Image (cartoon, rainbow, N blue to C red):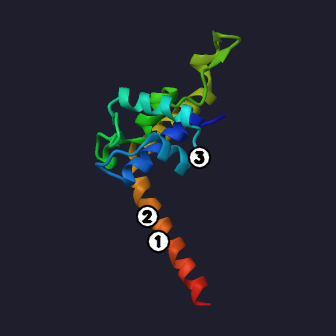
């Protein structure tokens, strides 16, 4: 079971790059190189983000892609739903038919509870929060590099 698909992962990574260049246009080629995302694959992802209003694009020498919303308002749940639909841990299907035990299934009720928790967490998590976490990691890493250089 995958909670996040490759499309969703790449979209979040692209949004993080755009968030570090807030208000600026960044080329798809630059995002592709920085994140190691295949260029043609990334272009399709960026088109979907444009279609849903998270980003906009501009052609030309000064063109590229930029965020259309403040990073703190872009919820990870929203990005997941663009690329893979709602988070569901079980479809309660058997051989493409709805399970006959669905109404009385205690496991299904527990799975639904877990889905609610997961969806709530993804609702609270934003690109802005991930950018803050990234800064903390980078600062911690640069502190480690400084200590290594002082030795």
Q: Of discs 3 and 1, which sits in the foreground?
A: 3
Q: Which residue is mark 1?
A: 139
Quarter of the image with the C terminus in it: bottom right
Q: Secondary structure at mark 3?
A: loop
Place of residue 149 in the rendered image (x, y in percent of width and height, measured from the top left)? 58, 85
Q: Which residue is mark 2?
A: 135
**Residue placed farthest to the front in the image?**
61
- Residue at the (38%, 55%) spot, across then down: 20
Tally the numbered discs.
3
Q: Is residue 95 above or below residue 24?
A: above
**Residue placed farthest to the right in the image?**
95
**Which disc number belongs to residue 36?**
3
**Residue placed farthest to the bottom in the image?**
151
- Residue at the (61%, 26%) spot, across then down: 90
Question: Would residue 132 be seen by someone viewing this image from the given angle?
Answer: yes
Cβ–Cβ under 8 Å for marks 1 and 2: yes
Question: Would residue 56 be seen by someone viewing this image from the given angle?
Answer: no
Place of residue 63 in the rendered image (x, y in percent of width and height, measured from the top left)? 34, 40
Q: Of discs 3 and 2, which sits in the foreground?
A: 3
């Amino acid at each position: 079971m995958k909670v996040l698909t490759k499309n969703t992962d790449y979209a979040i990574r692209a949004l993080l790059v755009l968030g570090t260049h807030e208000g600026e246009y960044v080329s798809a080629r630059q995002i592709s190189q920085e994140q190691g995302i295949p260029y043609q694959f990334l272009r399709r992802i960026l088109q979907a983000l444009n279609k849903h209003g998270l980003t906009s694009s501009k052609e030309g020498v000064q063109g590229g892609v930029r965020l259309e919303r403040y990073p703190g308002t872009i919820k990870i749940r929203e990005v997941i739903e663009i690329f893979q639909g709602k988070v569901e841990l079980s479809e309660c299907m058997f051989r493409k038919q709805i399970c006959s035990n669905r109404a009385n299934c205690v496991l299904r009720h527990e799975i639904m509870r877990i889905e609610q928790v997961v969806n709530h967490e993804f609702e609270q998590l934003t690109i802005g929060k991930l950018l803050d976490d990234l800064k903390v990691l980078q600062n911690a890493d640069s502190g480690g590099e400084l200590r290594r250089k002082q030795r």
